[in-house]
Image (cartoon, rainbow, N blue to C red):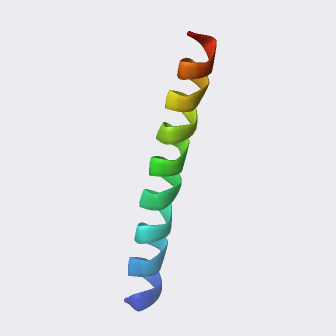
Amino acid sequence: MRVIEFKVKATQQQQIAILEAIRIGQFIRN
């Protein structure tokens, strides 16, 4: 169970990092 929870947390962090990268990219374009 701990492994699954760790994977879930990792995926959430990756999604947040991707969203931040997209926001930064849009900000640079503007």
The residue that appears at 53% across and 49% down in the rendered structure is 17
In the displayed structure, 21 sits above or below 25; it is below
Where's the N terminus, which quadrant?
A: bottom left
Give the farthest residue toward the bottom. Answer: 2
Say which of 21 and 7 sits in front: 21
Which residue is pictured at 56% across the width and 9% down the height? 30
Relative horizontal placement of residue 5, taking residue 29 as reference (left or right): left
Q: Quadrant of residue 29?
A: top right
| For residue 9, above or below residue 4 | above
- Residue at 38 percent across and 79 percent down: it is 5
Q: Position of residue 10 (x, y in %)?
A: 50, 67
Horizontal arrangement in the rendering, residue 3 relative to residue 28 (left or right): left
Q: Where does residue 3 sit, x and y in percent of width and height? A: 47, 86
Give whichever of 24, 3 is nearer the camera.
Answer: 24
For the point 55% across and 19% down, the residue is 26
Query: For this rendering, which residue is in front, 1 or 27?
Result: 27
Image location (x, y in percent) of residue 8: 41, 68
Q: How many marks?
A: 0
Is 16 rendered above or below residue 19? Answer: below
Q: Up-down: is 12 above or below 26?
A: below
Q: Quadrant of residue 25?
A: top right
Residue 4 lies, in percent from the top left, at: 43, 79
